[in-house]
Image (spheres, rainbow, N blue to C red):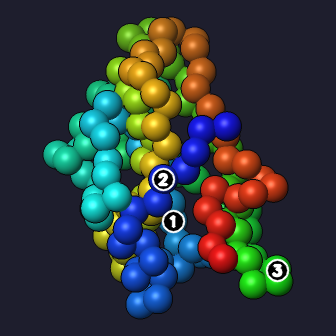
């Protein structure tokens, strides 16, 4: 399992209603440019994505929020996995999958990212799954 890296601003954003994780529209975008803990806003200018072609949608894949629940003081954001499937021209290269909030009130604020360690390029029919762990959640807040 690849570790999730949250951005520093997330903790403040949660306290000031910058994110409504239970209901906001989230996306995963692919990029070969590394985010940092200080990153705040996702854009193709800051984090160039693969071309919006070959079955890669501009801005990445919409993510389904399964739940955002709290048990014994621990909140977990549970997200459904998302799959990128390349067509004829392929998708990539990319190394990072960036989770961000596309809701109008959040204006593309980054929540965090996954680093897959090296650049990946998908050939025709190859798939890449961003696998969100349903037991620990994509994000756990204690």
In the drawing, does residue 7 fall left or right of residue 33? right
Looking at the picture, does residue 136 appear above or below residue 130? below
Question: Is residue 14 in sight in this rendering?
Answer: yes
Mark 3 closeness class: few <14, some 14–19, many ≥20 residues within 10 Å = few
Mark 1 sits on what residue? 25
Tell me what residue is drawn at x 58 percent, y 14 percent: 126
- Which corner quadrant of the image does residue 111 belong to? bottom left
SS for dot 2: strand
Name the mark on residue 68: none
Residue 20 position, x and y percent, is 53, 79
Residue 4 position, x and y percent, is 55, 50
Q: Compare residues 80 and 3 and report the one nearer the observer.
A: 3
Mark 2 or mark 1, which is nearer the start of the sequence?
Answer: 2
Residue 11 position, x and y percent, is 45, 77
Q: Estimate the spatial distance between the alpha carbons at disc 3 and disc 1, rounded to whole Å.
A: 23 Å
SS for dot 3: strand
Mark 2 sits on what residue? 5
Tell me what residue is drawn at x 34 percent, y 35 percent: 31
Residue contact between numbered discs 3 and 1, judged by CB atoms under 8 Å: no
SS for dot 1: loop
Residue contact between numbered discs 1 and 2, judged by CB atoms under 8 Å: no
Mark 3 sits on what residue? 71
Tell me what residue is drawn at x 53 percent, y 72 percent: 24
- Depth check, mark 1 against mark 2: the one in front is 2
């Amino acid at each position: 399992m690849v570790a999730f890296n949250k951005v520093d601003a997330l903790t403040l954003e949660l306290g000031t209603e910058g994110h409504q994780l239970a209901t906001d529209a989230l996306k995963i975008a692919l990029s070969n440019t590394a985010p940092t803990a200080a990153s705040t806003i996702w854009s193709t200018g800051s984090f160039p994505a693969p071309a919006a072609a070959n079955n890669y949608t501009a801005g990445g894949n919409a993510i389904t929020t399964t739940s955002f629940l709290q048990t014994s003081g621990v909140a977990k954001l549970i997200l459904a996995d998302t799959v990128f499937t390349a067509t004829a021209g392929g998708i990539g290269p990319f190394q990072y999958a960036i989770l961000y909030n596309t809701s109008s009130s959040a204006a593309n604020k980054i929540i965090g990212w996954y680093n897959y360690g090296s650049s990946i390029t998908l050939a025709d029919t190859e798939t890449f799954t961003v696998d969100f762990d349903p037991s620990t959640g994509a994000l756990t807040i204690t």
